[in-house]
Image: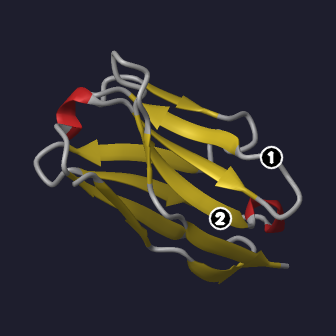
Amino acid sequence: QVQLVESGGGLVHAGGSLRLSCEVSGFTFSRYTMSWYRQAPGKERESVSSISNTGGSTNYADSVKGRFTISRDNVKNTVYLQMDSLKPDDTAGYYCCAGPDLYGITYWGQGTQVTVSS
């Protein structure tokens, strides 16, 4: 059974930090590109960051470059998102995503809420 379980969300003041984690099971984690997406109320889901299966390549949305850092541990089957210098505009549900794989399949977590107060 495929599972992606996010944790680490919460309420933080502007300028603060949070570290999100996404622990996965049920598939071969080390074969998948992992991504973080976010969705704010009334807005479309947007890509925040991604990391290649080996961790050797990362990408970031312009809005988070220099503030967020994605990483992964292929032994612990976990991907992380370190979020620093948080802004109220970062408030959203954050979702972990695996894939797509060679068949175009993606797996999603249930999300974790991040709220940044001004």
Q: Residue at x 73, y 34 (%)?
A: 62
User: Could you tell whether 102 is left or right of 38 in the image?
Assistant: left
* Badge 1 density bin: few <14, some 14–19, many ≥20, Cα 10 Å: few
In-front residue for pair 34/85: 34
Indicate the position of residue 9 as horizontal and vertical percent values: 53, 74
Q: Which badge, 2 or 1, comes first in the chain's sequence?
A: 1
Circle on res. 15: none
| Residue positioned 19% across, 49% down in the render | 26
Q: Quadrant of the C terminus?
A: bottom right
The residue beneath circle 1 is 44
Q: Quadrant of the N terminus?
A: bottom left
Q: Position of residue 85 (x, y in %)?
A: 67, 62
Q: Secondary structure at mark 1?
A: loop
The residue furthest left is 75
Q: Which quadrant would residue 21 be assigned to in this image?
A: bottom left
In this picture the colour scheme is secondary structure
Label 2: which secondary element: strand
- Mark number, residue 93: 2
